[in-house]
Image (cartoon, rainbow, N blue to C red):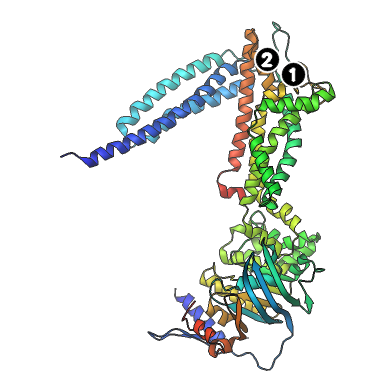
Amino acid sequence: MFDYQARRHFVDRMMVFLCGAAAFIALVPLGSLLWFVILQGIKRMGTPGILVAITVSLVLLALPYMIYKYLKHLPYLAYPLAFLAGLWVLGLLGQLWKVASQIDWKDMGFFIHTPTPVGVPGGGMGNAILGTLTLVAIASCVGLPIGILAGVYLSEFGKKGKFAWAVRFTADVLSGVPSIVTGIVAYTLIVKPMHHFSAVAGGVALGFMMIPITTRTTEELVKMVPHSIREASWALGVPQWKTILLIVIRTAKNGILTGVLLSIARIAGETAPLLFTAFNNQFWPTGINQPTASLTVQVFTYAISPFEDWHDQAWTGALVLLLLVLAVNMAAKLLFKNPRQLLR
Amino acid sequence: MGPMIEEMDEKVKKTGAKVESKPGESRKIEVVHQEPSGEVKPVKMRAAQVCAWFGGKQALFSVNMDIFEREVTAIIGPSGCGKSTLIRCFNRMHETVPGSRFGGTILLDRENIYDPKVDPVAVRRRVGMVFQKPTPFPTLSIYDNVAIGLRLNGTRDKKTLDEVVEKSLRKAALWEEVKDGLHRAGAGLSGGQQQRLCIARSLAVDLEVLLMDEPCSALDPISTSKIEDLIHELRQNYTIIIVTHNMQQAARVSQKTAFMLNGKLIEYDATEKVFTNPTNKLTEDYITGRFG
């Protein structure tokens, strides 16, 4: 007698295993990317490098323990797997600390110095880091007010009507435009009339990219504010504009902040628009009207060069950029713990 | 369970509403409490030939009603009969619905609030509203919730705000419960407390008329009875119009009752009369539970 139930059980378990395996495989590219960048990047990072190495070590050491806890109810599986994971982690840690032992942990040169000519030791990417922060700041000044107010318009006044539809459609299309196209447009609009590259042009190009993301996020968030809050405000005799600015936006502010942080994380990592707008600069910036270095463009320049020392610096630059973007994304996730938290 | 039942019994004895039901018979509601007769109160609001539409669909058909000052007027009727629409016309909230239309006149102290020269925002400061679902503003503390109406209309003086907040919370019978935690989040209170907070918020704006759209339907019986007590107290200073789908509540709380059906005002009279000796057969059918 063929045991249908046993076969069904087997198929069920098989599906769980397959989906779990797929999920695990999805982690592999991210894990290996992080690992590679960290391993190569901490060489020139100085004190923060040691801190990164310590944090990564702690996380890796926690891994076998997590596996053990997760599979505790299957002891014949838990112990061997945890043991194997432990061995693998030890191998990784060995590699990591072999690299880390070569770091001069007092050397903050990467963050303080500007690039030096090839062959001269002790260069850094201090100006590039400052440049990225400057460009993001300028982009925020351009992109955030327009994006947030447009989002408020779309959700409060633009429920029907062709104009609102056109704005929404444009925002959706713009968010998919390749960033290099935005760069070329900014070049034509700003760099050519000004006759020189500048941080302003770079910031504006990045701001153009920020607008559609911020608009759509703000619109979704403001729509999530319950209509009863607006009605309660009107019933108190508060005029419409005050209701929107002071009650609705205040209620949605956590969510809007999340959207802002996500768009900042996105544009901080853009290279293509900066190639023809902010170009690059080997010295500290003295104003926003001159070409400005940025982490992304500097990494690009160094990575395609033939010099070993510059390759090392490019890895470190990539690691710093990665950590920056990760930090901003984490901050956004912390504010966004669950959808109800958005309205607190 | 014991104390709660006794409390409810006290309440029933106070207002004199008795609910009798013998097996097999539909419930009858007797209201024994009598207003001192002969006392005529001035008319606070008058609705004349009020019609309202949502898009193409007409919701109110020529409603005529007088609301008397410092009285509680209840509007009862089955779901969808237009009670909420009517009450929202009284403070010009109906027009906030896109596609809505209004016809007729509503007078507040003999001024037409639908006159084109009248600012709806000014009307809403005199005629406030409490909704079915308590909606304290989630990001504000209790103090800020009550003060928000004043703050957004320009009052900045901290001393005035403190006074008004305390006065409103006392009037809403919430002061004793929250006075130690005024800066806690408004949304952390229980349902009944939140509803009383919303009432306090409306009272802070110095109203003349308070509209209540099914204020107790989302609350438990204890909170409901507390809010009904509150309505009894507020009646001495404010005119109250309450929409309720709970007939017993209308009998407990109001002096005048209006019965609506399908957008038309069927009967409007003193509560005792409507519940004991209604003129219209439809009213009697609804009261005795034959439909609705």
Give left or right: position of B291 versus B192. Answer: left
Q: Earlier in the sequence, mark 1 or mark 2?
A: 1
Residue B263: which numbered mark, if any? none
Q: Quadrant of residue B121?
A: bottom right
Mark 2 lies on a secondary structure that is helix
Q: Report whether residue B172 is seen.
A: no
Q: Position of residue B45 (x, y in %)?
A: 72, 79
Q: Nearer the viewer, residue A331 or A180?
A: A180
Mark 1 lies on a secondary structure that is loop
Q: Amino acid at mark 1?
A: Asn
Same chain shared by disc 1 and disc 2: yes
Farthest residue, direction front? B56
Residue to which mark 2 is pinned: A301
Residue at x 68%, y 71% (from the top left corner): B89
Q: Tell me if mark 1 has few (under 14), some (14-19) or many (20+) residues whose alpha carbon lies within 10 angstroms of its own.
A: many
Q: Position of residue A43 (x, y in %)?
A: 60, 15
Chain letter of mark 2 equals A
Q: Nearer the viewer, residue A311 or A104?
A: A311
Q: Amino acid at mark 2?
A: Thr
**Quadrant for the N terminus of chain B in the image:** bottom left
Q: Position of residue A115 (x, y in %)?
A: 72, 14
Residue to which mark 1 is pinned: A280
Q: Position of residue A120 (x, y in %)?
A: 71, 7
* Label 1 close to label 2 by CB (< 8 Å): yes
Q: Nearer the viewer, residue A270 or B160?
A: A270
